Amino acid sequence: MHQNAKSLPASKSQSDEKQLIERARAGDLDAYGLLYDEYGSGVYNLVLRMLGNAEDAEDVRQEVFLKAHRSLKGFKGEARFSTWLYRIATNVCLDEIRRRKPAASIEQMGEDGSWEPVKDSSEGHPEQELGRKLSQEAVQAALSKVAPHYRVLIVLRHLEDRSYEEIAAIVGCSVNSLNVRLHRAREAFRKALTPYLSEDSHGDLPSGPKTYLALY
Amino acid sequence: MTCRLVRKHISLYIDSQLDSRQRRQVEEHLEACASCRTCHQSLQSAVEALGCLERQEPRAGGWERLRYQLENESARSQPSPVWRLWKPVVAGVGGVALVAGVVLSLLHSRPVNMADSGQTPPSSSRSAVSAPSGLAPSLPHNQNRVASGAEDNSASAQDNPALAPAVSPDVAVKARANRRVARSPGSPAALRHNWRVARHPAGSTAYSEPDPAFAHDTVSEPASTTRDIAETVSTGMQPLLAAAEMDDPVSSLTDIRSEDWL
């Protein structure tokens, strides 16, 4: 589905990465630069899809790596470095989104913390949307309307191609809990996407075969 | 497999997270149930729509900017060579100043404390106490307490009414004068005075209450001196602590940990 920068090149093993981390922890910025080269792109794309803005994504990526460098001494190697780094990135993104206070999301947490999905007006008639095509902007806009704590699951799973176990470690929940949350996240995204189907049917479509997707 | 169960597993089915048996059961149900099939198709389509989001490459120069920031942070966290030379000197001077401050505050608070606490000063105030001739000869052990202040007078007087007329007016005046001095702003006695007033808004009535612990106390010289020292030490820190609570920038220096000086 996507090119993925999550894994190290074949020439670099886990021990190589550990050595890089040790050197970076000792203050070797060149070693940290290699880690940045390895994970910078993945972190950027995670942040980009979470925030939906390239300029902000660049700034937040820098903040993520700054925080990671400051916290490097606390990294004990119990989790993979990428998991640890993505956890920092996720938290920074959620903080940033919280600070911005978005006007509305597709679903809101109830006062008692329960999940309250927004009613879908077109629910039950998906066949009406058959043949509609979506642009990249529309999908990103729909993604941005999903509540951040669900959005991050979609991005990690479908855009960063992370395993269930790793996503569970990043967001700090069990795999069983992740199953439920991920289903809700996809459902929320599907509902968020529905309004864009009719808009895109009138044009404004990007070029390239991959972006011409029939939703239903 | 029921519709409810299928919809519960539909996400795992899309993600190929079900084992072969469960997968086959779901597929059989989807073939038979149009409603569940629609549900599956719409969710599957939404997931596939995410495929149009292509990976983006960040703009070049990100590492150079980050490295610059990291080097700046590192430079800020390291002390300058000049500071490294002066650090022991500053730490020494700071330490001496701190000790001197504590000692001075103790010395300053010692006479004030005795004037207010009703204890016998070692020499001078004791002679001042014994000088008045109007004291009742039948109460020699209360002499020390008479001179210490009007509140103690009244306390003893209430405890033993025979003592009340024995206090000469000039002793009371001296005691009041001592109290005024002792209640200069910031002194421990002043702090205690304010505290007492706050506890007993009625004012002088607070002072007229007898203190049973003192009323029948036969004060001997060594015991009195020991209590003086103990109370002086304990109350000597009060101005510092009280000032620190008021966010006094100077006194808050006492809160700085020793490692911060090094």
Image (tube, coloured by chain):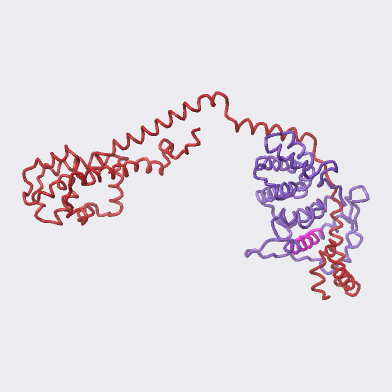
Chain colours: A purple, B red
Q: Quadrant of residue B119?
A: top left
Q: In screen coordinates, is A44 left or right of B249?
A: right
x and y percentages locating residue A82 in the rendered image: 75, 47
Asked if A149 appears above or below B19 in the picture, the reply is above
x and y percentages locating residue B227 in the rendered image: 25, 46
Residue at the spot 76% in from the left edge and 42% down from the top edge:
A17
Asked if B33 appears above or below B159 in the picture, the reply is below
Determine if the magenta segment contains residue B45: no
Q: In screen coordinates, is A99 left or right of A12?
A: left
Look at the image and give the residue range highlighted in magenta: A180-193
Q: Give the main secondary structure of the magenta stretch.
A: helix
Point out the residue furthest to the right here: A209
Asked if B150 appears above or below B257 in the picture, the reply is below
Point out the residue furthest to the front here: A15
x and y percentages locating residue B198 in the rendered image: 31, 52
Identify which residue, B141 or A197, lies in the foreground. B141
Q: Quadrant of residue B47?
A: bottom right
Q: In screen coordinates, is B51 left or right of B227?
A: right
x and y percentages locating residue A116 in the rendered image: 70, 65
Determine if the magenta segment contains residue A191: yes
Q: How many marks?
A: 0
Identify which residue, B75 or A112, lies in the foreground. B75
Residue at the spot 83% in from the left edge and 75% down from the top edge:
B1
